[in-house]
Amino acid sequence: MKLRFAPSPTGFLHVGGARTAIFNLLHARRYGGTMLLRIEDTDVERSRQHHAEQIVASLRWLGVEWDEGPIHQSDRLDRYRERAEELVASGKAYRCYCTVEELDAERAAAESAGKQWRYSGRCRHVAGVSNEPHVIRFAVPPGMIEFQDLIRGEMQFEGELIDDFVLLRSDGNPTYHLSVTVDDIDMAITHVARGDDHLSNTPKHVLLFRAFGADVPSFAHLPLILGADKKRLSKRTGATSAEEYREMGIVPEALFNFLTLLGWSPGENREIFTRDEAAQWFDLGDVNKAPAVFDPEKLLWMNGQYLMRMTPEQIYPHLVAFLGDDPRSLEELRTIIDLHKMRARTLRELAEQMTIYFIDDDAIEYDADTVKKHIKGDDLATRLSSLHDTLASTDPFDVTTAEAALRKLAESQGVSAAKLIHPLRLALTGKGVSPPIFDVAVVLGKERSLRRLTRLIEQLSLLSS
RNA sequence: GGCGCAUUCGUCUAGGGGUCCAGGACGCCGCCCUCUCACGGCGGUAACACGGGUUCGAAUCCCGUAUGCGCUACCA
């Protein structure tokens, strides 16, 4: 068994393509098959080398591996010409001297007359060989074309309704239909899993496999991924490339898992699982027929689930990119990551939350809403001063000791602990939300915590006015 | 227009004739936990597109209709 993912390098790796790659990989792994990566860059107009490199990088990042390739179709142009000539020689294809201008004009005329247009096949009968520019067209035979689709079942198409499609362009480059079948034959592909948009092209490919005397592979046409507007996922409705999700702070394992669930389910209500688990359960035949809407909210939730289950060691390599020019070491961040990982949905959020530990004690900006809520009462200054003294004499300065000391103080002051805790949070972080405040204090250390508390006390009159 | 594909809660899905007045997850709402947030726990909201059949019985099978999408290029 051998599968392949065959992107064309006309842009970044689209999430739909990413999912196609994942499904190919999973099916190959499930059944011990081989996975091939092939770059379909026969369209010189639109293909770019840097896109190919970007796609390869995105696949690596995502964790989609391949056993062979990447093979570039642009390296195999001679092979496609050779195969096209074979078909001409055997009478299954022919040279066509019609120009695009002529054909476009015919098409436009037919359209304005309200009639559907199809190529007449008139060049089938042109005799001899001329040096005039020409394409090679496949002579589509009449009759029903049938094939099996793993996802849709038995498919039937009427041959008469298919144009004599172009195999080789006038510049000598192959079209998709030619290159894809020549390659799938040469590379012994047994299962073709690709986007739904190719379903209508498949009869052409079946015809070509037969014309070449090759076995027709199994097909699996995956439904598209839609945006919130139920249209093909586009930039209007959200990020479309794997790269954008990386930049957003999505970890690859989460995106992989999420994409896997679009159009497929392992059953038994399983949502979070590893690539290896998916590879044990996956089968192309279980993929849904209906297109799926990409829900960024659920991706964010899933990413949060991953972050919270990952260790600081696992998170750190992904996090570094979000830490700015002067990233701290894993050692410095280990505790902080543990404190914040269940509070962030993306690496970006995580990095953002961690900044409170590294800014100057004097640079903290107090959140206005939190100030309004917790900075009140004439005796606040004195109570916080007492808190300062209490914390100053707390030894050791650890979570349990500090918390016990604060609670004891609150009791002696006749107020709830919350009356001290919220101002303390504001003092240490400038915010109304944070991890448990004594954990934050311990990370900061006694000295910096006291300095931050002192600063708040000093600014109290300013803030409450 | 032609050909093809699809249609279960807002979204992702489970379901493959009776156990479904439809299960899980995200989101949303409420409660609990609690120093805040998050996590977690508990509960709630919400769906078989429509119409005909077949059958003792249909979300599940068949046929229409509607809607959406794809292809109809010297793009893939």
Image (tube, coloured by chain):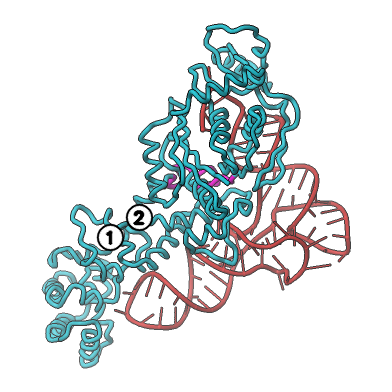
Residue A188 found in image quarter: top right
Q: Which chain letter goes with mark 2?
A: A
Q: In this orientation, which residue lies closer to the viewer: A274 or A45?
A: A274
Q: Nearer the viewer, residue A117 or A57?
A: A57
Residue A249's tag is 2
Q: What percent of the width, then of the height, locates residue A252?
A: 40, 55
Q: Colour of chain B?
A: red
Element type at marker 2?
loop
- Residue A433 shown in magenta: no
Highlighted range, magenta = A222-240
Which tint was used for chain A?
A: cyan
Real-space CA distance between mark 2 and mark 1, rounded to the nearest whole angstrom: 9 Å
Closer to the camera, A441 or A228? A441
Amino acid of disc 1: Ala
Residue A310: image x %, image y %?
Answer: 37, 66
Residue at image point 53% right, 26% down:
A175
N-terminal label among 2 and 1: 2
Q: Is residue A233 magenta?
A: yes
Amino acid type at image mark 2: Gly
Residue A67 seen by the camera: yes
Quadrant occupied by the C terminus of chain A:
bottom left
For numbered disc 1, what is the local secondary structure? helix
**Relative to A177, A425 lies left or right:** left
Label 1 resides on the chain identified as: A
Determine which residue is flagged by label 1.
Answer: A351
For the point 22% across and 69% down, the residue is A429
Marks 2/1 in contact by CB < 8 Å: the verdict is yes
Up the image or down, A108 lies above or below A199; here it is above
Q: In front here: A130 or A113?
A: A130
